[in-house]
Image (spheres, grey):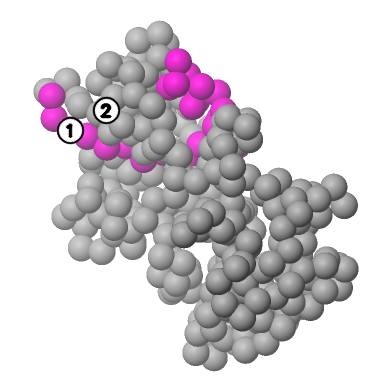
C-alpha cells in the first residue's frame, strides 16, 4: 500500500484501500477481503494470486469459491449479517494478531461513491465463531443479499439508507433516501480543513450550489438546519513521483431527524493532477445533482 493511500484511509477513518489500487472487483464477482477461518488477514489474499471469486448458493449453504479453494457457510450457522461500511476498529476485532488493522487490504470503490462490504458472522463445523468480510461486485449485491435474506435465519442489518437501497426499495428502507431532500432549504455546511489543504474548500462548495440556482439558506449552526453537509479536506505532500502532492476530500450528506443525523450520501475524491477539479468542487456538484434529482429539477 502506498503512503498516499494509507494517508487517505486514515483521514477517512474507514477501510477503503483496494487490494489493487487500480481496479475494482468485477461486477459479476466477489472478493474475500478477510476471513478468520481461512486466515485471510493483514494484507493476505485468498487465494494469493486470485483474490476474486464467485458466489454459488444452494438451498443449504452460502459458497464462495476462488480457484481450487472455497468457503462454505451453512445458512443455519450464520449468526449475523451486515451490509455497509466497516471501520478499522471493527475489522481489528478479527484480524489479530495484525499489529495495525489499517494495513488490511480492503476495497476503495470508484469515486465519488464509497463502496459497502458484507460482513458475515457464523460458526464453523467445530462450533467456533468466525467472521468473513466480502466485497460484492455491483451485479452481485441484490442477488446475494436476496439469497441470504431468503435462506438465512437472521435479518440483514444495514448501516445506513445508502446501503439498504442497493437491495430494497426506498419505501422498504424508510426515510433518509436522497429523495427526501425534496422541499428542504435550510442547510448547515461544516467544513474541516487540514494543514496545507484547500483553504477555499468552503467557498468552492457554496459556489457550485449558487451557480446551480438552488434557493437554499445557509445557516451558521446546526440549529434549525434541515440538511447538514460535512466535508473534510486533507493534503498529502508530493514525493519524487508526484511533486504537486495529493488533495483529498471526503464528504457526507445528512438529513436532520430530531436530535440525530441520518446519512444518505457519502463522497470521496482526490486530486493528483493540476488539470483536475478540486474535491470540494466535485462535492458541491454531487450535492447539486442529488438535490435536483430529489426535487424533480
Q: Is residue 3 above or below residue 214?
A: below
Q: Work out whether residue 24 can be spotted.
A: no
Q: Callout 1: few (<14), some (14-19), or many (20+) C-alpha neighbours within 10 Å?
A: some
Which residue position holds label 2? 79
Where residue 192 appears, x then y in whole percent?
53, 80
Name the residue: 13% across, 24% down.
127
**Pointers 2 and 1 in contact (C-beta within 8 Å):** yes
Q: Is residue 71 left or right of residue 250?
A: left
Q: Quadrant of residue 292?
A: bottom right
- Residue at disc 2, secondary structure: strand
Q: Is residue 247 above or below residue 212?
A: below
Image mark for residue 279 = none
Q: Work out whether residue 144 can be spotted.
A: yes
The residue lying toward the viewer, choosing from 96 and 157, is 157
Q: Report the magenta residues as a range.
A: 127-150
Name the residue: 54% across, 83% down.
193
Amino acid at each position: 500500500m502506498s503512503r498516499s493511500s494509507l494517508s487517505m484511509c486514515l483521514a477517512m477513518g474507514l477501510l477503503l484501500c483496494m487490494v489493487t489500487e487500480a481496479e475494482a472487483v468485477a461486477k459479476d464477482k466477489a472478493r474475500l477481503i478477510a476471513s478468520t477461518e481461512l486466515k485471510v488477514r493483514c494484507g493476505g489474499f485468498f487465494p494469493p494470486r486470485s483474490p476474486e471469486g464467485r458466489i454459488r448458493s444452494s438451498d443449504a449453504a452460502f459458497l464462495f469459491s476462488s480457484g481450487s479453494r472455497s468457503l462454505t457457510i451453512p445458512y443455519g450457522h450464520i449468526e449475523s449479517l451486515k451490509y455497509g461500511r466497516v471501520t478499522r476498529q471493527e475489522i481489528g476485532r478479527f484480524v489479530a494478531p495484525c499489529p495495525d488493522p489499517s494495513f488490511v487490504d480492503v476495497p476503495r470503490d470508484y469515486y465519488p461513491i464509497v463502496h459497502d462490504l458484507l460482513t458475515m458472522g457464523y460458526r464453523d463445523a467445530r462450533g467456533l465463531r468466525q467472521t468473513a468480510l466480502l466485497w460484492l461486485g455491483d451485479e452481485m449485491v441484490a442477488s446475494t443479499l436476496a439469497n441470504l435474506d431468503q435462506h438465512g435465519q437472521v435479518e440483514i442489518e444495514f448501516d445506513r439508507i445508502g446501503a439498504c437501497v442497493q437491495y430494497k426499495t426506498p419505501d422498504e428502507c424508510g426515510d433518509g433516501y436522497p429523495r427526501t431532500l425534496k422541499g428542504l432549504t435550510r442547510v448547515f455546511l461544516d467544513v474541516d480543513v487540514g494543514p496545507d489543504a484547500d483553504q477555499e474548500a468552503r467557498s468552492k462548495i457554496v459556489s457550485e450550489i449558487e451557480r446551480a440556482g438552488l434557493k437554499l439558506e445557509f445557516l451558521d449552526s446546526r440549529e434549525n438546519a434541515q440538511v447538514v453537509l460535512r466535508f473534510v479536506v486533507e493534503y498529502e505532500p508530493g514525493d519524487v513521483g508526484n511533486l504537486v502532492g495529493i488533495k483529498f476530500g471526503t464528504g457526507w450528506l445528512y438529513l436532520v431527524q430530531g436530535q440525530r443525523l441520518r446519512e444518505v450520501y457519502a463522497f470521496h475524491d482526490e486530486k493528483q493532477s493540476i488539470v483536475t477539479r478540486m474535491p470540494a468542487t466535485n462535492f458541491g456538484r454531487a450535492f447539486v445533482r442529488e438535490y435536483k434529482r430529489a426535487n424533480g429539477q
